[in-house]
């Protein structure tokens, strides 16, 4: 299928994701004139709406989640006129005929966004196929979770592949839609400054942290069956690692970029069962305080005993020529002191300090790429403090900052789903995850879980509002490295 879709079908159209992200993102694209003029949007879910009541539902979502300066009533009304709704029980094949009639001709280009429980993937795909909504002019976007391990992921992907070939399958990782994540590629491959030292000769280690201050936040049913390793490391963090570690692609397109990412993911050193206790840390938050407010522990929030991890730290390695011997420290957790997603590239120290005899102390350079909540790129370099230096040379680490929020203040910061939905509609696969990437990620993750099981590893309790179990600090400190905490 080539060209933009003329119809968009949203499964899960009454869910939290649709209200918070999908509808505001589609409105943003509409108000900026980026959607095809003839595009119609059909929502579907079990809820018993008709067109009018769903438009009221969508209007309430926009009123709740749009910034005040984006609430243009005329634009909202024009956007709502694009929207229709068809109730559907995806587990029952009978309703798909009515859905197909509502959507209209799919041979003119149809994009489907599928956000349903994993158990509904197979019947939904079968229903779409039977109703004629899976032809050559149809592409499908798949929202996670796509399985809980390699076997279940393959089962879902096999079900999808029976109807939709890989070039019409768009697996979504919303982190890849973030502006700063895409800036990793611009930073690496648009500048000559970094490439000569972007390897084991110039880099001491890399840290990737995705921390949250929230707890379960209404996701108990999903999260307790998933845990931090599956929820964050398997997709978001490993995708960030792949972007940092990949070789330069020959061109900026979906095939070349994803080819290089999958090479990295397949080069991840397997963590054996014997190594799991030494290279991984797992934790679960107890009661504590976050931002000055007392919060309950995980099991109290959940209301039942659980061995699910809410924190993971891992020391990983990429076994190839560029990265041999460079540790990648990965960390994610809930109820941590700050909400931040960042990548820290710690460079090696200079081979010889000419300032040591004059009292000058050097710190190795570091590159900090902050993805959220602020978006910036910061290079930490050494500079001399002003003065006559009669008592020695005073050096200080200073930041060279590129704040995307400031530098591009006149440009609206877009929700990640805006780019991903537009790319789905236009058929651009660059920022979507290919099947071989997903399976390489699951193979590595499954081996870690086998190591936990083989060693009887249970999550260590950490106080809410801390940076996780003390063992996570030891994971880096024994290599004479420290987590970058602000």
Image: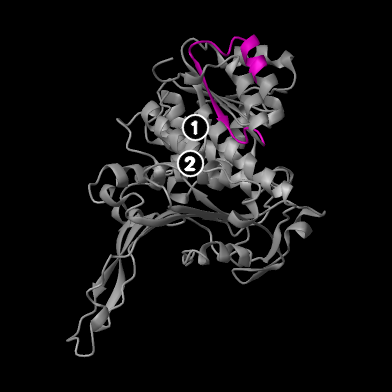
Q: Read off the magenta span.
A: 125-148
Identify the residue at image location x=40%, y=46%.
244
The answer to whether residue 79 is left or right of residue 96 is: left
Q: Is residue 64 above or below residue 360?
A: above
Farthest left residue? 388
Q: Residues within 10 Å of mark 2 (few under 14, many from 20)?
A: many
Q: Which mark is residue 433?
A: 1
Whether the magenta-drawn stretch holds residue 128 is answered as yes
Q: Position of residue 125 (x, y in %)?
A: 64, 18
Q: Is residue 47 visible?
A: no
Q: Give yes or no for residue 138 being in the magenta stretch.
A: yes
Going by the picture, which residue comes out furthest to the bottom? 390
Q: Is residue 28 above or below residue 297?
A: above
Secondary structure of residue under mark 2? helix
Q: Is residue 325 visible?
A: yes
Residue 239: which numbered mark, if any? Answer: 2
Front position in the image: 180 or 137: 180
Q: Could you say where residue 187 lies in the image, as x and y percent from the top left?
A: 31, 47
């Amino acid at each position: 299928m080539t060209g933009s879709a003329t119809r968009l079908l949203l499964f899960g159209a009454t869910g939290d994701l649709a209200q918070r992200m999908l509808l505001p993102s589609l409105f943003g694209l509409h108000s900026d004139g980026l959607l095809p003029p003839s595009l119609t949007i059909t929502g579907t879910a079990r809820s018993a709406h008709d067109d009018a009541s769903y438009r009221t539902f969508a209007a309430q979502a926009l009123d709740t989640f749009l910034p005040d300066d984006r609430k243009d009533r005329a634009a909202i009304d024009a956007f709502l006129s694009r929207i229709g709704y068809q109730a559907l029980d995806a587990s029952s094949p009978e309703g798909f005929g009515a859905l197909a009639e509502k959507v209209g001709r799919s041979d003119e280009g149809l994009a489907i966004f599928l956000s349903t429980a994993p158990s509904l993937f197979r019947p939904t795909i079968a229903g779409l196929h039977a109703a004629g909504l899976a032809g050559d002019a149809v592409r499908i976007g798949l929202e996670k979770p796509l399985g809980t391990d390699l076997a279940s992921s393959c089962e879902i992907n096999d079900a999808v592949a029976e109807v939709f070939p890989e070039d019409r399958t768009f697996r979504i990782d919303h982190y890849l839609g973030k502006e700063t994540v895409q800036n990793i590629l611009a930073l690496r491959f648009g500048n000559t400054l970094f490439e000569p030292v972007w390897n084991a000769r110039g880099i001491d280690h890399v840290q990737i942290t995705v921390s949250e201050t929230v707890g379960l936040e209404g996701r108990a049913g999903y999260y307790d069956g998933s845990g931090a390793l599956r929820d964050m490391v398997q997709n978001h963090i490993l995708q960030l690692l792949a972007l940092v570690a990949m070789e330069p692609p020959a061109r900026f397109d979906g095939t070349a970029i994803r080819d290089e990412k999958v090479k990295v993911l397949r080069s991840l050193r397997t963590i054996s069962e014997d190594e799991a206790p030494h290279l991984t840390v797992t934790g679960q938050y107890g009661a504590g305080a976050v931002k000055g407010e007392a919060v309950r522990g995980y099991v109290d929030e959940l209301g039942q005993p659980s061995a699910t991890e809410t924190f993971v730290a891992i020391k990983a390695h990429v076994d190839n020529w560029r990265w041999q011997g460079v540790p990648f420290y990965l960390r994610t957790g809930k109820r941590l002191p700050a909400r931040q997603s960042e990548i820290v590239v710690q460079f090696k120290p200079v081979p010889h300090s000419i300032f040591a005899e004059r009292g000058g102390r050097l710190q190795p350079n570091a590159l900090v790429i902050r993805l959220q909540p602020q978006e910036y790129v910061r290079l930490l370099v050494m500079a001399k403090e002003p003065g006559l230096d009669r008592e020695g040379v005073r050096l200080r680490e200073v930041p060279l900052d590129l704040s995307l929020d400031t530098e591009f203040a006149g440009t609206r910061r877009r929700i990640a789903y805006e780019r991903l939905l537009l790319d789905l509609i236009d058929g651009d696969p660059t920022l979507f995850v290919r099947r071989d990437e997903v399976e390489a990620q699951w193979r590595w993750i499954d081996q870690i879980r086998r190591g936990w099981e083989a060693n009887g590893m249970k999550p260590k309790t950490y106080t809410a509002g801390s940076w996780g179990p003390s063992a996570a600090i030891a994971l880096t400190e024994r290599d004479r490295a420290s987590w970058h905490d602000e």
